[in-house]
Amino acid sequence: MVTLIGHHPDVIHDAVAKYGSPLNVISTGPFQRNIESLNQVARGHDLNFRVFFARKANKCHAFVDAALNAGAGIDVASEQECAQALHRGAEGRDMVCTAAIKPDGLIRLCIENQVTIVIDNWDELNAVGNMTKTLQESCPLALRISGFRHEDAKLFSRFGFDIDDVEALIDVLPDLFPNIQLTGLHFHLDGYCPRQRVSAITQCLPLIDQLKAAGHAIEFLDIGGGLPMRYLESESEWNAFWAAHEQALRGNVPPVTWRNHGLGFQMVDGQLIGSRNLYPYYQEPIREQWLETVLSGPETSTGSIAEGIRQRGIQLRCEPGRSLLDGSGMTIARVEFCKQLSNGDHLFGLAMNRTQCRTGSDDFLVDPILLRDPRSSDTAAREGYLAGAYCTESDLILLRRLRFPAGIGRGDLIVLPNTAGYLMHFLESRSHQFALAKNVVLESERQLRLDAIDAA
């Protein structure tokens, strides 16, 4: 990606001219290296381990293919994702279904292909059990567990069976649903705290012992996703931004965000209240260091977490999305206008909308890269905001005020780096009947091809 931007900007300009703006460019090399970095940690602990790529983080087929080629599995969250993975060559043992909503069509597809279904509640359990009876087929299941104790508090989640209620469920499973094979336990915790994962695993391991003693062939423990990544190299820059933003919210300096947007904070009676409604763009530990911290954590009966898992002869699984896609994509948009508003602010209008680079957080705090149109002659420094194509006051691509010291003008390209994880596709929409962004795969320094999701 860096080589393409730095040495072949003409290829990017040509691609946007051919496929339209915005354009998503992806690369599978960093993705596979991120998978291997986790595998190396597990090998260091002599663990049976497998990564399952959370497909919901990016819809491109190239990442499904790359995951399977790297020996990873696929975590699917819808019937369409499940069908696509099967079409790309995944088999049931390569997949796990963690969909928050599981209609009959998805359940049937999973059962027919022996995809492990992660059960979240009694209604799902009944639906799967009844479907196994209708199809006269067995089905591998994992129970999603929640409600773990951590530092004298209960970790709340809207997903899963509370750990205090699981024993009663286990007692009735064989009689209610003889075709169901309970093969694993699963959990997913909100946030990125490794100590919380240690607490959850520590409480799951004795439960696995109970399940095995009751005759259930438990094969794995799945710790879900939420493996952290870091977008920014500099912690000092991250802290400096928040210090400047706080001063702006207090009225001591000019705003650094559009209309002094708080990014989760607001001033109330002279007090700054709230919390950051953003991904932690700088954090540590990340990915492989984070996994090492978890696996080295204490498990009271046998030593470390890794030792507790290894001694039970089960596979450890995880389902990263964002952290596997770190460094694997960028979104490019064409500048269509520059204008100054009556209050003095400048707007730089892009041929894209904010849903095409957004998750559920308030903003994307990564600096864009400007690729000038070779025909541009405007070099006057400008400072302002990137605006989107939707006809609403709120459609800002980024909320931060940006400075372009060498100018910016119509026909230039804005590159939003590291957007492959969730930002490209999670909330994309086509209001105003705008087409969704095309997705191209970088195959060599100068060669791009449409991903199969768009090639049909």
Image: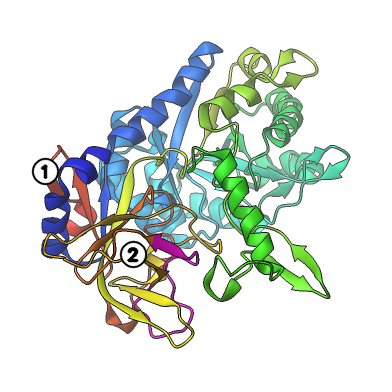
**On the rendered structure, is 301 left or right of 431?**
right
What residue is rendered at 48% in x and 62% in y?
103
Q: Position of residue 153 (x, y in %)?
A: 85, 44
Query: Mark 1 is on which residue type?
Result: Gln
Q: In this picture, is 199 found above or below 361?
A: above
Query: Dot 1: few (<14), some (14–19), or many (≥20) neighbours within 10 Å?
Result: few
Asked if residue 421 is among those painted magenta in the image, a careful observer would answer: no
Q: How many marks?
A: 2
- Work out which quarter of the rendered image holds the C terminus and state it: bottom left
Q: Nearer the viewer, residue 149 or 314?
A: 149
Question: Which residue is under mark 2?
Answer: 381
State whether residue 417 appears in this view.
yes
> Taking 312 as reference, is 281 above or below it?
below
Secondary structure at badge 2 equals: loop
Residue at 17% across, 41% down: 7
Q: Crowding near pointer 2: few (<14 within 10 Å), some, many (20+)?
A: few
Asked whether the viewer can see residue 456, the reply is: no
The residue segment tinted magenta is 387-403
- Image quadrant where one finds the N terminus: top left
Give the x, y percent position of residue 217: 59, 26
Local secondary structure at mark 1: loop
Find residue 335 and report its horizontal and vertical position in percent: 26, 69
Going from N to C along the chain, the mark reached first, 1 or 2, is: 2
Nearer the observer: mark 1 or 2; the answer is: 2
Q: Is residue 392 magenta?
A: yes
Q: Which residue is mark 1?
A: 447
Residue that appears at 34% across and 64% down: 381
Q: Is residue 86 left or right of residue 345?
A: left
